Amino acid sequence: MITPDILPILRCPSDGGPLAWAQPELVNCVNESINSGDARDQLDTRVDAPIDAGLVNQSADRLYPVRDQIATLVAENAIRI
């Protein structure tokens, strides 16, 4: 679980920049993209599982999925946004 005191410590595994919580609208958009089969990760693999939340990098081009309160902070698994 990511608590408010942990979030400032987390960094994007790809560019080293800070991460921020994705807005609910973005999470909904990503889930719609997942449901339609259009969501892809950084390796161009189709993302199948919906997300509960997400962490967005500073340039807002990738979202690290959060499922069951666990963030996946692996560069290759980030969803392209």
Image: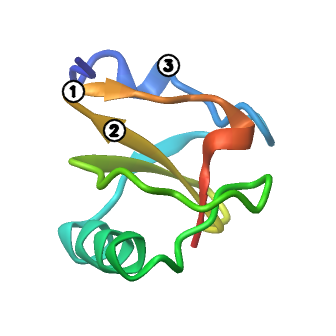
Please give the label number shown on residue 69: 1
Q: Is residue 76 left or right of residue 33?
A: right
At label 1, the amino acid type is: Gln
Q: Position of residue 77 (x, y in %)?
A: 63, 42
Q: Nearer the viewer, residue 38 or 63?
A: 38
For badge 3, the amino acid type reads Ile
Q: Give the alpha-carbon distance from disc 1 to disc 3, as whole Å.
A: 17 Å
> Which quadrant of the figure contains the N terminus?
top left
The disc, 1 or 3, on the residue closer to the chain's N-terminal end is 3
Give the left or right position of residue 74, taking residue 2 as reference. Answer: right
Tag 2 near tag 1, CB within 8 Å: yes
Q: Nearer the viewer, residue 17 or 13?
A: 13
Question: What label sits on residue 66 in the rendered view?
Answer: 2
Spatial separation of the CA atoms under disc 2 and disc 1:
6 Å
Name the N-terminal-most of marks 3 and 2: 3
Q: Is residue 23 left or right of residue 33?
A: left
Q: Please, is residue 62 above or below residue 69 in the view?
A: below
Percent across and percent down for residue 17 are: 69, 41
Q: Is residue 39 above or below residue 41?
A: below
Which label sits in the foreground, 1 or 3? 1
